[in-house]
Image (cartoon, grey):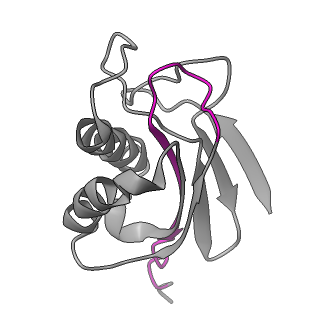
C-alpha cells in the first residue's frame, strides 16, 4: 500500500496550509480521501448561505475528484460538519441533487465553530476508484 498526499494541478487549491487529497493505492483500487471543503469563491471569500456554500463545496469536490478520473458517483462516505443542524434541509437538498440518487454512507454533526469565519459547513469525502483491468497478455 502506498499513499501520496498532494494538491492536484488544475483543481481548486486549499485555503490554508494543508493538502487537498490523500491518494492511497490499495491494490485493485485507489482511495481518494479529500480534505474538508468549505464554500468559498476562487478568491477565498466565503459565500452567503448554506445552499450557496453547499453548491460550491460540491463543485470543488467534483473538481478534485475529476483530477483523478473520478466523479461524485465514486464517493463512498461523506462527513459533514455544520454550525446549525436547523439548516440541514438546505444542505440536504443540494447534496441529494448532486449525488444523483446514489447516497453514500454519511456522518453529519453540529459543531461550535469552523476554521474560517463565515463558513456554515464543511464537507469531507472518501471516494473509491477501481483500477482499470490490465490488458490481457498475448502469447
Q: Is residue 124 left or right of residue 4?
A: left
Q: Is residue 129 magenta?
A: yes
**Percent from the top left, x then y, of residue 80?**
52, 54
| Residue, far right | 1
- Residue 115, position as x, y percentages in the image: 62, 25
Q: Is residue 78 left or right of residue 47?
A: right
> Residue at 36% across / 41% down in the picture?
57
Whole-percent x, y for residue 102 in the image: 31, 79
- Which portion, as a residue range, is magenta? 112-136
User: Farthest bottom residue?
Assistant: 139
Image height of 62 relative to 133, above or below: above
Residue at horizontal 78 percent and vertical 55 percent from the top: 2
Please check the rendered image and state whether residue 116 is part of the magenta-colored stretch, yes or no: yes
Of 53 and 60, the residue lying toward us:
53
Image position of 96 with respect to 43: above or below: below
Pick the residue in front: 70 or 37: 37
Q: Residue at x 27, y 26 (%)?
A: 48
| Magenta region, main secondary structure | loop
Q: Can residue 72 be seen at all in this image of the molecule?
A: yes
Taking depth in this image into account, of 19 and 88 the one nearest to the observer is 88
Q: Is residue 16 above or below residue 57?
A: above
Work out which quarter of the rendered image holds the N terminus and state it.
bottom right
Residue beneath the point at 56% across and 41% down: 36
- Mark yes or no: residue 69 visible: no
With 94 as the anchor, is 134 left or right in this view?
Answer: right
Percent coordinates x, y for residue 69 in the rendering: 37, 55
Amino acid at each position: 500500500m502506498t499513499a501520496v498526499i498532494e494538491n492536484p494541478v488544475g483543481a481548486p487549491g486549499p485555503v490554508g496550509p494543508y493538502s487537498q487529497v490523500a491518494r492511497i493505492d490499495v491494490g485493485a483500487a485507489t482511495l481518494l480521501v479529500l480534505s474538508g471543503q468549505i464554500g468559498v469563491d476562487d478568491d477565498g471569500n466565503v459565500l452567503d448561505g448554506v445552499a450557496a456554500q453547499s453548491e460550491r463545496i460540491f463543485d470543488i469536490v467534483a473538481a478534485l475528484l475529476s483530477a483523478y478520473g473520478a466523479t461524485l458517483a465514486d464517493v463512498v462516505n461523506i462527513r459533514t460538519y455544520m454550525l446549525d443542524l436547523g439548516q440541514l434541509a438546505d444542505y440536504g437538498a443540494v447534496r441529494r441533487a448532486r449525488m444523483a440518487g446514489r447516497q453514500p454512507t454519511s456522518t453529519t454533526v453540529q459543531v461550535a465553530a469552523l476554521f474560517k469565519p463565515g463558513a456554515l459547513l464543511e464537507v469531507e469525502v472518501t471516494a473509491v476508484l477501481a483500477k482499470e483491468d490490465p490488458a490481457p497478455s498475448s502469447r
